[in-house]
Amino acid sequence: MKKIITICAVLLMTASVFAQAPEKMSYQAVVRDGSNALVTSTAVGMQISILQGSASGTAVYVETQTPTSNANGLVSLEIGSGTVVSGDFTTIDWANGPYFIKTETDPTGGTSYTITGTSQLLSVPYALHAKTAETVTGTITETDPIFGASVASGITGADTTNWNNKLDSYTETDPIFGASVASGITGTDTTNWNNKQDQLVAGTNITIVGNTISATGGSSNDFYLGQDTLGGIVFYIYIGSDGNQHGLIVNKNESTAQWQSSGTTTNATRSWDGAYNTGLMTSSPAANYVNGLTDGGFTDWYLPSIDELSILWHNRFHVNNALNAGGFTLLSNTSSYWSSTEANAPTAFDIPFHRGYTANSSKTNTFSVRAVRAF
Protein backbone atom coordinates (compact mmCIF):
# COMPACT_ATOMS: atom_id res chain seq x y z
CA MET A 1 0.00 0.00 0.00
CA LYS A 2 1.47 3.42 -0.89
CA LYS A 3 2.77 5.78 1.80
CA ILE A 4 2.12 9.51 1.93
CA ILE A 5 4.39 12.22 3.37
CA THR A 6 2.48 15.07 5.01
CA ILE A 7 4.65 18.11 5.60
CA CYS A 8 4.02 19.56 9.07
CA ALA A 9 6.63 22.31 9.40
CA VAL A 10 9.59 23.86 7.65
CA LEU A 11 9.87 26.78 10.02
CA LEU A 12 13.17 27.02 11.88
CA MET A 13 16.64 28.07 10.81
CA THR A 14 19.82 28.29 12.87
CA ALA A 15 22.84 30.42 11.97
CA SER A 16 26.24 31.20 13.46
CA VAL A 17 26.67 34.55 15.17
CA PHE A 18 28.57 36.26 12.35
CA ALA A 19 27.06 34.51 9.31
CA GLN A 20 24.59 36.11 6.95
CA ALA A 21 23.31 32.82 5.43
CA PRO A 22 21.65 30.11 7.62
CA GLU A 23 23.76 26.97 8.18
CA LYS A 24 20.93 24.57 9.04
CA MET A 25 17.19 24.39 8.56
CA SER A 26 14.91 22.25 10.72
CA TYR A 27 12.41 20.11 8.86
CA GLN A 28 9.64 17.89 10.19
CA ALA A 29 7.16 15.64 8.44
CA VAL A 30 4.52 13.07 9.40
CA VAL A 31 4.54 9.79 7.45
CA ARG A 32 1.21 8.11 6.77
CA ASP A 33 0.30 5.09 4.63
CA GLY A 34 -2.42 4.87 1.97
CA SER A 35 -5.04 4.18 4.71
CA ASN A 36 -3.95 7.41 6.45
CA ALA A 37 -2.41 5.36 9.29
CA LEU A 38 0.80 6.63 10.89
CA VAL A 39 4.04 4.87 9.92
CA THR A 40 5.88 4.68 13.24
CA SER A 41 9.40 3.76 14.35
CA THR A 42 10.54 3.19 10.75
CA ALA A 43 13.66 4.40 8.92
CA VAL A 44 12.71 6.64 5.96
CA GLY A 45 15.11 7.44 3.10
CA MET A 46 14.98 11.10 2.02
CA GLN A 47 16.75 13.28 -0.54
CA ILE A 48 16.34 17.03 0.02
CA SER A 49 17.07 19.59 -2.69
CA ILE A 50 17.08 23.42 -2.53
CA LEU A 51 15.80 24.67 -5.91
CA GLN A 52 16.34 28.22 -7.13
CA GLY A 53 13.92 30.25 -9.24
CA SER A 54 10.94 27.89 -9.48
CA ALA A 55 9.54 24.51 -8.42
CA SER A 56 11.48 23.00 -11.34
CA GLY A 57 14.52 25.27 -11.02
CA THR A 58 18.22 24.51 -10.63
CA ALA A 59 19.22 22.53 -7.54
CA VAL A 60 21.81 24.66 -5.70
CA TYR A 61 22.15 22.14 -2.89
CA VAL A 62 21.27 18.42 -2.54
CA GLU A 63 21.74 16.09 0.43
CA THR A 64 20.42 12.73 1.66
CA GLN A 65 19.34 11.63 5.12
CA THR A 66 17.73 8.57 6.71
CA PRO A 67 15.62 9.77 9.68
CA THR A 68 13.52 7.38 11.78
CA SER A 69 9.87 8.19 12.52
CA ASN A 70 8.86 8.32 16.18
CA ALA A 71 5.83 6.75 17.88
CA ASN A 72 3.66 9.49 16.37
CA GLY A 73 4.92 8.96 12.81
CA LEU A 74 7.02 12.19 13.02
CA VAL A 75 10.44 12.45 11.39
CA SER A 76 12.75 15.36 12.25
CA LEU A 77 15.96 16.37 10.55
CA GLU A 78 18.23 19.36 10.00
CA ILE A 79 18.79 20.31 6.38
CA GLY A 80 22.45 21.17 6.04
CA SER A 81 23.70 18.32 8.24
CA GLY A 82 23.03 15.37 5.91
CA THR A 83 25.25 13.58 3.40
CA VAL A 84 26.02 16.20 0.71
CA VAL A 85 25.29 15.13 -2.85
CA SER A 86 26.06 18.49 -4.45
CA GLY A 87 26.41 22.17 -3.57
CA ASP A 88 27.34 24.00 -0.34
CA PHE A 89 24.49 24.93 2.02
CA THR A 90 26.47 27.74 3.69
CA THR A 91 27.06 29.58 0.38
CA ILE A 92 23.40 29.78 -0.71
CA ASP A 93 22.49 33.41 -1.49
CA TRP A 94 19.01 33.50 0.11
CA ALA A 95 18.38 36.99 -1.24
CA ASN A 96 18.61 35.68 -4.82
CA GLY A 97 15.32 33.73 -4.60
CA PRO A 98 12.69 32.55 -4.71
CA TYR A 99 13.80 29.16 -3.36
CA PHE A 100 11.90 25.89 -3.09
CA ILE A 101 12.43 22.74 -1.02
CA LYS A 102 12.05 19.49 -2.94
CA THR A 103 11.75 16.27 -0.92
CA GLU A 104 12.08 12.78 -2.41
CA THR A 105 11.17 9.93 -0.12
CA ASP A 106 11.68 6.16 0.00
CA PRO A 107 9.29 4.91 2.76
CA THR A 108 11.37 1.69 2.99
CA GLY A 109 14.50 3.57 4.11
CA GLY A 110 16.47 3.14 0.87
CA THR A 111 17.20 5.41 -2.10
CA SER A 112 14.37 4.31 -4.41
CA TYR A 113 12.50 7.56 -3.99
CA THR A 114 8.85 7.12 -4.92
CA ILE A 115 7.24 10.12 -3.20
CA THR A 116 8.11 13.64 -4.33
CA GLY A 117 6.92 17.00 -3.02
CA THR A 118 7.99 20.59 -3.67
CA SER A 119 7.06 23.69 -1.67
CA GLN A 120 8.23 27.29 -1.73
CA LEU A 121 10.27 28.83 1.08
CA LEU A 122 8.09 31.77 2.14
CA SER A 123 8.48 34.67 4.59
CA VAL A 124 9.25 32.68 7.77
CA PRO A 125 12.63 31.28 6.56
CA TYR A 126 13.54 34.44 4.67
CA ALA A 127 12.93 36.58 7.78
CA LEU A 128 16.15 35.12 9.22
CA HIS A 129 18.06 36.59 6.26
CA ALA A 130 17.19 40.12 7.39
CA LYS A 131 20.87 40.93 8.14
CA THR A 132 21.36 41.60 4.43
CA ALA A 133 19.49 44.82 5.08
CA GLU A 134 22.82 46.19 6.30
CA THR A 135 23.79 46.58 2.64
CA VAL A 136 20.59 48.31 1.43
CA THR A 137 21.03 51.80 0.03
CA GLY A 138 18.41 54.29 -1.01
CA THR A 139 14.81 54.67 0.22
CA ILE A 140 12.21 51.92 0.76
CA THR A 141 8.80 53.18 -0.31
CA GLU A 142 5.79 52.02 1.78
CA THR A 143 2.95 51.10 -0.61
CA ASP A 144 0.30 50.22 1.98
CA PRO A 145 -2.46 52.84 1.37
CA ILE A 146 -4.14 52.34 4.79
CA PHE A 147 -0.85 52.71 6.64
CA GLY A 148 0.24 55.57 4.39
CA ALA A 149 -2.92 57.57 5.16
CA SER A 150 -2.56 57.19 8.94
CA VAL A 151 -0.55 59.18 11.48
CA ALA A 152 1.61 56.07 11.96
CA SER A 153 3.25 56.58 8.56
CA GLY A 154 4.93 59.77 9.81
CA ILE A 155 6.58 58.21 12.86
CA THR A 156 10.34 58.74 12.98
CA GLY A 157 13.04 57.44 15.30
CA ALA A 158 12.88 60.71 17.24
CA ASP A 159 9.11 60.33 17.62
CA THR A 160 9.56 56.82 19.01
CA THR A 161 12.08 58.13 21.52
CA ASN A 162 9.65 60.90 22.48
CA TRP A 163 6.85 58.38 22.90
CA ASN A 164 8.98 56.16 25.14
CA ASN A 165 10.07 59.18 27.21
CA LYS A 166 6.66 60.86 27.46
CA LEU A 167 5.26 61.84 30.84
CA ASP A 168 2.59 59.32 31.86
CA SER A 169 0.53 61.62 34.06
CA TYR A 170 -3.04 62.85 33.94
CA THR A 171 -1.79 66.21 32.69
CA GLU A 172 0.70 66.07 29.79
CA THR A 173 3.34 68.73 30.29
CA ASP A 174 6.07 67.41 27.96
CA PRO A 175 6.38 70.09 25.26
CA ILE A 176 8.73 68.01 23.08
CA PHE A 177 6.37 65.03 23.01
CA GLY A 178 3.35 67.28 22.57
CA ALA A 179 4.89 68.90 19.48
CA SER A 180 5.77 65.57 17.82
CA VAL A 181 3.75 63.24 15.59
CA ALA A 182 3.86 60.64 18.39
CA SER A 183 1.45 62.70 20.51
CA GLY A 184 -1.29 62.17 17.90
CA ILE A 185 -1.01 58.36 17.79
CA THR A 186 -4.34 56.59 18.47
CA GLY A 187 -5.29 52.98 18.99
CA THR A 188 -6.36 52.81 15.34
CA ASP A 189 -2.95 54.12 14.24
CA THR A 190 -1.23 51.41 16.31
CA THR A 191 -3.43 48.74 14.72
CA ASN A 192 -2.61 50.08 11.24
CA TRP A 193 1.10 50.01 12.09
CA ASN A 194 0.96 46.41 13.31
CA ASN A 195 -1.09 45.29 10.29
CA LYS A 196 0.87 47.10 7.59
CA GLN A 197 1.97 45.06 4.58
CA ASP A 198 5.69 44.24 4.71
CA GLN A 199 6.39 43.15 1.13
CA LEU A 200 4.25 40.01 1.30
CA VAL A 201 4.93 37.25 -1.26
CA ALA A 202 2.02 35.10 -2.48
CA GLY A 203 2.58 31.36 -2.09
CA THR A 204 0.84 28.25 -3.41
CA ASN A 205 -2.94 28.76 -3.78
CA ILE A 206 -2.63 32.37 -2.48
CA THR A 207 -3.11 35.60 -4.45
CA ILE A 208 -2.46 39.20 -3.31
CA VAL A 209 -4.21 42.01 -5.19
CA GLY A 210 -3.86 45.43 -3.60
CA ASN A 211 -4.98 45.06 0.03
CA THR A 212 -6.79 41.75 -0.58
CA ILE A 213 -5.25 38.33 0.18
CA SER A 214 -7.26 35.42 -1.23
CA ALA A 215 -7.02 31.64 -1.15
CA THR A 216 -7.46 30.00 -4.56
CA GLY A 217 -7.41 26.33 -3.58
CA GLY A 218 -6.63 23.79 -0.87
CA SER A 219 -8.74 22.14 1.83
CA SER A 220 -12.27 23.23 2.59
CA ASN A 221 -15.20 21.93 4.59
CA ASP A 222 -17.73 23.40 2.16
CA PHE A 223 -17.59 20.78 -0.63
CA TYR A 224 -20.82 19.22 -1.87
CA LEU A 225 -21.74 16.51 -4.41
CA GLY A 226 -22.08 17.97 -7.89
CA GLN A 227 -19.88 20.99 -7.08
CA ASP A 228 -17.89 22.39 -10.02
CA THR A 229 -14.47 23.05 -8.45
CA LEU A 230 -10.76 22.21 -8.59
CA GLY A 231 -10.90 21.28 -12.27
CA GLY A 232 -13.98 19.01 -12.30
CA ILE A 233 -17.15 17.81 -10.53
CA VAL A 234 -17.19 16.48 -6.93
CA PHE A 235 -18.74 12.97 -6.87
CA TYR A 236 -17.52 11.54 -3.54
CA ILE A 237 -16.86 13.15 -0.11
CA TYR A 238 -15.60 11.83 3.21
CA ILE A 239 -14.20 13.37 6.42
CA GLY A 240 -10.50 12.59 6.95
CA SER A 241 -8.67 12.14 10.24
CA ASP A 242 -7.61 15.81 9.99
CA GLY A 243 -11.27 16.83 10.35
CA ASN A 244 -11.44 18.19 6.79
CA GLN A 245 -13.46 17.04 3.82
CA HIS A 246 -11.69 14.90 1.23
CA GLY A 247 -12.98 13.02 -1.78
CA LEU A 248 -12.87 12.51 -5.53
CA ILE A 249 -13.41 14.84 -8.51
CA VAL A 250 -14.22 13.65 -12.06
CA ASN A 251 -12.99 15.51 -15.13
CA LYS A 252 -15.65 17.37 -17.10
CA ASN A 253 -14.45 15.91 -20.40
CA GLU A 254 -13.93 12.39 -21.70
CA SER A 255 -12.25 10.61 -24.59
CA THR A 256 -12.09 7.11 -26.05
CA ALA A 257 -8.97 4.94 -26.02
CA GLN A 258 -7.59 1.42 -25.71
CA TRP A 259 -6.57 0.27 -22.23
CA GLN A 260 -3.43 -1.16 -23.80
CA SER A 261 -2.26 -1.46 -27.39
CA SER A 262 -1.29 -5.09 -26.74
CA GLY A 263 -2.24 -7.36 -23.85
CA THR A 264 0.69 -7.66 -21.41
CA THR A 265 0.73 -7.97 -17.62
CA THR A 266 1.35 -4.67 -15.76
CA ASN A 267 0.45 -5.62 -12.13
CA ALA A 268 -2.06 -2.75 -12.05
CA THR A 269 -4.41 -4.96 -10.02
CA ARG A 270 -5.49 -2.70 -7.13
CA SER A 271 -9.26 -2.35 -7.01
CA TRP A 272 -9.12 0.73 -4.75
CA ASP A 273 -6.12 2.75 -5.96
CA GLY A 274 -6.43 4.20 -9.45
CA ALA A 275 -3.42 6.50 -9.10
CA TYR A 276 -1.19 3.50 -8.33
CA ASN A 277 -2.62 1.48 -11.24
CA THR A 278 -2.29 4.32 -13.76
CA GLY A 279 1.40 4.67 -12.92
CA LEU A 280 1.95 1.04 -13.97
CA MET A 281 -0.03 1.07 -17.23
CA THR A 282 2.47 0.63 -20.07
CA SER A 283 1.77 0.98 -23.80
CA SER A 284 -1.55 2.52 -22.73
CA PRO A 285 -3.36 5.15 -24.82
CA ALA A 286 -5.88 5.53 -21.95
CA ALA A 287 -3.10 6.30 -19.42
CA ASN A 288 -1.41 8.66 -21.89
CA TYR A 289 -4.67 10.60 -22.21
CA VAL A 290 -5.27 11.10 -18.47
CA ASN A 291 -1.58 11.82 -17.75
CA GLY A 292 -1.63 14.65 -20.29
CA LEU A 293 -4.58 16.49 -18.69
CA THR A 294 -4.02 19.88 -17.00
CA ASP A 295 -7.66 20.86 -16.40
CA GLY A 296 -8.05 23.38 -13.58
CA GLY A 297 -4.27 23.75 -13.47
CA PHE A 298 -3.90 20.25 -11.97
CA THR A 299 -1.68 17.49 -13.38
CA ASP A 300 -2.56 14.70 -10.91
CA TRP A 301 -5.42 13.22 -12.97
CA TYR A 302 -5.54 9.42 -13.20
CA LEU A 303 -7.77 6.60 -14.51
CA PRO A 304 -10.15 5.47 -11.71
CA SER A 305 -9.80 2.00 -10.19
CA ILE A 306 -12.80 -0.33 -10.52
CA ASP A 307 -13.98 0.63 -6.99
CA GLU A 308 -13.66 4.35 -7.76
CA LEU A 309 -15.42 3.85 -11.10
CA SER A 310 -18.25 2.02 -9.30
CA ILE A 311 -18.66 4.96 -6.89
CA LEU A 312 -18.75 7.29 -9.92
CA TRP A 313 -21.47 5.16 -11.54
CA HIS A 314 -23.56 5.18 -8.33
CA ASN A 315 -23.20 8.98 -7.98
CA ARG A 316 -23.51 9.76 -11.70
CA PHE A 317 -26.73 11.73 -11.00
CA HIS A 318 -24.75 14.56 -9.37
CA VAL A 319 -22.21 14.68 -12.20
CA ASN A 320 -24.79 14.52 -14.99
CA ASN A 321 -26.89 17.16 -13.23
CA ALA A 322 -23.86 19.48 -13.06
CA LEU A 323 -22.65 18.80 -16.62
CA ASN A 324 -26.10 18.56 -18.24
CA ALA A 325 -25.35 17.87 -21.92
CA GLY A 326 -21.73 16.98 -21.09
CA GLY A 327 -22.55 13.95 -18.91
CA PHE A 328 -21.75 10.28 -19.33
CA THR A 329 -22.38 8.25 -22.48
CA LEU A 330 -25.30 5.87 -21.87
CA LEU A 331 -25.88 4.42 -25.36
CA SER A 332 -25.49 0.65 -25.11
CA ASN A 333 -22.84 0.37 -27.81
CA THR A 334 -20.60 3.19 -26.51
CA SER A 335 -21.26 3.35 -22.76
CA SER A 336 -18.45 1.13 -21.42
CA TYR A 337 -15.90 3.07 -19.34
CA TRP A 338 -12.41 1.75 -18.61
CA SER A 339 -11.14 1.37 -15.05
CA SER A 340 -7.38 1.20 -14.36
CA THR A 341 -7.70 -2.19 -12.63
CA GLU A 342 -6.18 -5.08 -14.59
CA ALA A 343 -8.01 -8.43 -14.59
CA ASN A 344 -5.24 -10.48 -16.25
CA ALA A 345 -2.74 -10.18 -19.11
CA PRO A 346 -5.30 -9.82 -21.93
CA THR A 347 -8.18 -8.08 -20.06
CA ALA A 348 -9.02 -5.19 -17.71
CA PHE A 349 -12.18 -4.27 -15.79
CA ASP A 350 -14.78 -1.86 -17.19
CA ILE A 351 -18.37 -0.81 -16.38
CA PRO A 352 -21.05 -0.42 -19.09
CA PHE A 353 -22.76 2.70 -17.70
CA HIS A 354 -26.14 1.83 -19.28
CA ARG A 355 -26.24 -1.32 -17.11
CA GLY A 356 -23.95 -0.72 -14.15
CA TYR A 357 -22.33 -4.12 -13.70
CA THR A 358 -18.57 -4.86 -13.64
CA ALA A 359 -17.16 -6.57 -16.72
CA ASN A 360 -13.69 -7.46 -17.94
CA SER A 361 -12.87 -6.87 -21.58
CA SER A 362 -9.95 -7.13 -23.97
CA LYS A 363 -7.44 -4.37 -23.31
CA THR A 364 -7.30 -3.57 -27.02
CA ASN A 365 -11.00 -2.54 -27.07
CA THR A 366 -11.65 1.16 -27.48
CA PHE A 367 -13.91 2.34 -24.60
CA SER A 368 -14.78 5.70 -23.02
CA VAL A 369 -12.22 7.21 -20.61
CA ARG A 370 -12.92 9.67 -17.76
CA ALA A 371 -10.11 10.91 -15.51
CA VAL A 372 -10.48 11.57 -11.76
CA ARG A 373 -8.33 13.20 -9.06
CA ALA A 374 -8.38 13.19 -5.25
CA PHE A 375 -8.62 16.23 -2.95
Image (cartoon, grey):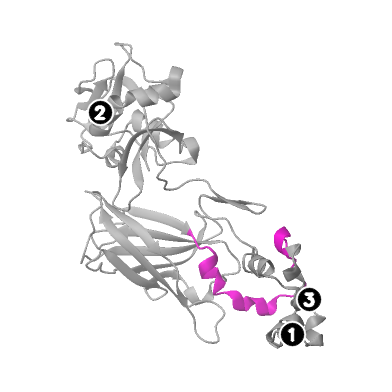
Pointer 3 residue: 181
Q: CA distance from mark 3 to mark 2?
A: 70 Å
Report the front residue among 160 and 258: 160
Report the front residue among 349 and 127: 127
In this picture, residue 38 sits left or right of residue 5: left
User: Mark 1–mark 3 contact, CB under 8 Å?
Assistant: no
Q: Quadrant of the C terminus?
A: top left
User: Is 128 above or below relative to 251?
Assistant: below
State the mark number for residue 171. 1
- Residue 329: where, in percent of width, then height? 36, 17
Q: Is residue 369 visible?
A: no
Q: What residue sits 54% from the left and 77% below the top?
A: 21
Q: CA distance from mark 1 to mark 2?
A: 78 Å
Neighbor class of circle 2 (other Cα within 10 Å; few <14, some 14-19, many 20+) is some
Pointer 2 residue: 310
User: What's the magenta region?
Assistant: 120-147
Instruction: Kindly identify the amino acid type of the residue bearing the numbered disc 2.
Output: Ser
**Along the polypeptide, which appears first: circle 1 or circle 3?**
1
Residue 333: quadrant of the picture: top left
User: Is 195 above or below relative to 18?
Assistant: above
Q: What residue sits 62% from the left and 65% below the top?
A: 195
In this picture, residue 138 sits left or right of residue 96: right
Instruction: Kindly identify the amino acid type of the residue bearing the numbered disc 1.
Output: Thr
**Along the polypeptide, which appears first: circle 3 or circle 2?**
3
